Image (tube, grey):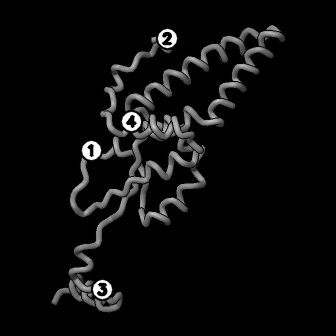
Amino acid sequence: MNITLMVACIFIWASGLSISQLESTKLRIGIFDSRCIAVAYGRSAGFMNEMDSIRTAHTKAKEKGNTELVEELEQLGPTKQVLLHQQVFSNGSIKNILEKLREKFPALAKDNEVKMILSKWEIPFADESIELIDVTDQLTVLFNPDEETKKVIENIKLMEPMPIEKISIDPMK
């Protein structure tokens, strides 16, 4: 018997697991539909407050004659809108949104017994040794969605994402 096989047998014996249990153990990975998270965030009080802050800062910059800041803020609003469109209607990265939930991920992972959480759109392949656990609803609830937002989220789940190349970079379209 070679040393590797002997170590494996000792591990199995010491852990109390059978070979069939080891073979049936799957790596659990949490997945989410990024579009649903983006909708919950985009319709949240937190996002509305961010947009109000931008408008307030813009007004104050205009009053003070700070043209550089005015131009920056006038660009920021439409940029946020285009980004949100890419996130909601396609599969654009939601890293900026996930940062707001960073401290929630360890508990979410523990509760769902997953080792990793990532966007379902970023998994080009997973074999049968991986068990994918959908945590979308658990993430959207963190933005306190109202009933209308919950309906929008359910509708988005039924649709395929639009190719990101088809999302206009003009916020007025």
| Residue 127, above or below 88 | below
Q: Earlier in the sequence, mark 1 or mark 4?
A: 1
| Nearer to us: label 1 or label 4 | 4
Estimate the spatial distance between the alpha carbons at disc 1 and disc 2, rounded to whole Å.
33 Å
* Residue that carries the numbered disc 4 in the rendered image: 155
Label 3 close to label 2 by CB (< 8 Å): no
The residue furthest left is 1
Residue 19 appears left or right of 32 = left
| Nearer to us: label 3 or label 2 | 2
Q: Secondary structure at mark 4?
A: helix
Which corner quadrant of the image does residue 120 belong to? Answer: top left
Q: Position of residue 150 (x, y in %)?
A: 49, 40
* Residue that carries the numbered disc 3 in the rendered image: 17
Q: Position of residue 111 (x, y in %)?
A: 49, 65
Q: Which kind of residue does numbered mark 2 sit on?
A: Met
* Residue that carries the numbered disc 2 in the rendered image: 172
Q: Which kind of residue does numbered mark 4 sit on?
A: Asn
Which corner quadrant of the image does residue 58 belong to? Answer: top right
Given residues 7 and 60, the one toward you in this image is 60
| Nearer to us: label 2 or label 4 | 4
Estimate the spatial distance between the alpha carbons at disc 3 and disc 2, rounded to whole Å.
60 Å
* Residue that carries the numbered disc 1 in the rendered image: 124
Q: Secondary structure at mark 2?
A: loop
| Nearer to us: label 1 or label 2 | 2
Q: Quadrant of the C terminus?
A: top left
Which corner quadrant of the image does residue 124 belong to? Answer: top left
| Residue 106, above or below 86 | below
| Residue 169, above or below 32 | above
Q: Earlier in the sequence, mark 3 or mark 2?
A: 3
Residue at x-position 69% and y-position 23%? 54
Estimate the spatial distance between the alpha carbons at disc 1 and disc 3, rounded to whole Å.
32 Å
